Image (cartoon, helix red, strand yellow):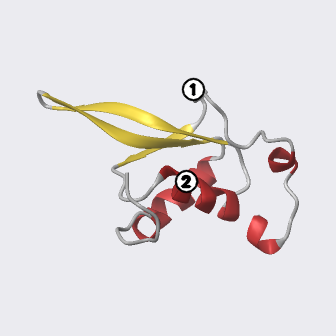
Amino acid sequence: MLKHGDINPLSVFGLRQIAHCPPHFERVGFDTKISEKQLTDWIFENLDGRFWIGDSFYTSGNNVGMQKCIGFESPGEASYFALMLDQINTYGSGESTI
């Protein structure tokens, strides 16, 4: 983790954030209140594994909506992120909102 001063080989070679979401990644969908940069900064600082961030469509009855979705290679990191999401994803967290 970055905040503990550990060097992560995936970060050194730019392989932590990937451009597509493989099927084995655990996904967490949510409505964003902060910028994507704030989300990725938190992930880089607090987690170690690979992740994907993008948009996801969902259906609710006859309605179709879009949410931000983050996929994690490690199911444990997905659980930790989901538990911390209420504290991370709050209005007035510094930068402009999406």
Vertical position of residue 74 compared to residue 82: above or below = above
Label 1 residue SS: loop
In the rendered structure, which disc, 2 or 1, sits on the residue that comes first in sequence?
1
User: How many neighbours does mark 1 have within 10 angstroms: few (below 14), some (14-19), or many (20 or more)?
Assistant: few
Hey, which residue is sitting farthest front in the picture?
A: 96
The amino acid type, in three-letter code, at marker 1 is Pro
Q: Nearer the viewer, residue 22 or 64?
A: 64
- At x 60%, y 31%, the residue is 24
- At x 41%, y 43%, the residue is 68
Q: Which of 81 and 36 is in front in this view?
A: 36
User: How many neighbours does mark 2 have within 10 angstroms: few (below 14), some (14-19), or many (20 or more)?
Assistant: few
Vertical position of residue 97 compared to residue 28: above or below = below
- At x 62%, y 54%, the residue is 76
For residue 37, which numbered disc appears in the image? 2
* Residue 16 appears left or right of 30: right
User: x and y percent of residue 98 in the render?
Assistant: 37, 51
For residue 62, which numbered disc appears in the image? none
Residue located beneath label 1 in the image: 23
Hey, which residue is sitting farthest left in the picture?
A: 62
Vertical position of residue 88 compared to residue 53: above or below = below
Quadrant for residue 69, please give it: top left
